[in-house]
Image (cartoon, rainbow, N blue to C red):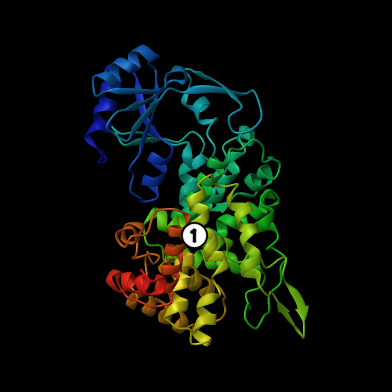
Amino acid sequence: MASFPQEVIQVAQSIHGRGGQAFLVGGSVRDRLFGQSVKDFDFEVFGLDPPALEAALASVGKIDYVGKQFGVYKLKGTEIDVALPRREQKSGPGHRGFAIEADPFLSIEAAAERRDFTMNALYLDPLTDKILDPVGGQVDIEKRVLRHVSSAFSEDPLRVLRGMQMVARFGLSPHPDTVALCRTVLFEHLPFERVGEEFYKLLTKGECIGDGLRFLEACGWLQYFPELEALVDCPQDPHWHPEGSVWVHTCHCLDVFASERTGDPLEDWVVGLGVLCHDLGKPVTTFYQGGRWRSPQHEDVGVPIAKKFLSRLTGEKRLIEDVLPMVSQHMRPYQFFSSHAGDTAVRRLASKVKRIDRLVRVCRADKQGRPPLKGENFKELDWLESRAEVLRIKDAAPKPWVQGRDLIALGVEAGPHMGAMLKRVFEAQLDGDFDDLEQGIQWACAYYNL
């Protein structure tokens, strides 16, 4: 018998004891077959009506009725979700346009037909370790093929984006028929948080992120992300970018990023978006002159373009604010190094990007995403990291030492003028005019005759 958490076995035993069948489904089975750890356990239960299922679950623990009308429950204090098989009928546009009816006596074959990909339509009995495979998902996993279950796939446009991140996560080759079907699916009525969730999985879990994006391209879905589509035919100087277009470069950069993720989901999400967006300004700044392609000021021009793109992935303003400075500043390390910039410039850069270490990660991916160039060195980035570490601003923006309370203690009255004073004192701090709070207070006293 496979090793499962005790609660998983208890749920299956309780359901079995009441005459039902409890199968783990979806990612619970797929990830296990791919040799990955499983943290979330999704059950589909056959042969028990809702009252009987609720009684079975209540004997194990407390129930959270997250979607009782659809036959969906959660066992409190666990990562176990339980659902009855259900019939779905398309009733409107988009991801949510379905009429759903729970049917505990639906056949496993019929239940499998509503799933998206064959590898997500496997049913595993945790009591016997037996797998039921009504649509050939095991073979597709062995061959690493992404294949849709049925024509009903096209009723939910979010499934195209699921395919994108699954290709990237599991190193899959999409079946030609699946790509062809995806090309008929329209991007419609998808809430940005669901779109962002799939990109989040792409960037924080994908091992071959470039393949995931190329799947999106093959499906004709880049038209719904015009900021990315513009990269496809944007040329680059072959001396600096022998790999080809900005699109090809971006895909390579993201694969480098994937190989160097930290494992911190938030940091990887922010930096991954920085890598994805860093060259979005090139299509509108690139021109041919003097025998070469040039893209002057693409980093600055790319900021509003990146902001528009990111606003369709997330409503988190803080996240967008964290990503945009990496777009605007990703050329600064090289400019600073070549101009022998001092500590003041480094402090000001840290104040803009908030975390030098994030910027360095974006730049490393940028520099390595240029095959077949080899033997890259990172002297500029190593220098910047070293200076940031000495200045204690590697993983945090400089914080003002002198606060309002310090000026009040010196007799300054609160008001708009105090804000202006604090801003000027902080500018002096960034310029290196003082190195701690005590020196900062002394500087303020001297400057404002306090």
- Residue 128 at x, y percent in the picture: 29, 33
Is any atom of residue 83 visible in this view? Answer: yes
Query: Would you place residue 214 above or below residue 198 in this image?
Result: below
Q: Using residue 297 as the reference point, say whether residue 113 is left or right of it.
A: left
Amino acid identity at mark 1: Gly
Q: Using residue 436 as the reference point, say whether residue 325 is left or right of it.
A: right
Tag count:
1
**Quadrant that contains the C terminus:** bottom left
Identify which residue is drawn at 66% across, 54% down: 218
Is any atom of residue 354 visible in this view? Answer: no
Query: Would you place residue 362 above or below residue 415 in this image?
Result: below
Q: Secondary structure at mark 1?
A: helix
**Quadrant that contains the N terminus:** top left
Looking at the picture, tell me which residue is in the foreground, 425 or 60.
425
Residue furthest out toward the left: 6
Identify which residue is drawn at 48% across, 51% down: 318
Crowding around mark 1 (Cα neighbors within 10 Å: few <14, some 14 to 19, many 20+) is many
Q: Using residue 258 as the reference point, say whether residue 63 is left or right of it.
A: left
- Residue 273 at x, y percent in the picture: 52, 58
Looking at the picture, tell me which residue is in the foreground, 28 or 195.
195
Q: Using residue 410 as the reference point, say whether residue 178 is left or right of it.
A: right
Identify which residue is drawn at 56% across, 59% down: 211
Query: Would you place residue 358 above or below residue 101 in this image?
Result: below
Disc 1 target residue: 272
- Residue 342 at x, y percent in the picture: 45, 83
- Residue 436 at x, y percent in the picture: 30, 72
Looking at the picture, tell me which residue is in the foreground, 349 or 21.
349
Looking at the picture, tell me which residue is in the foreground, 14 or 250.
250
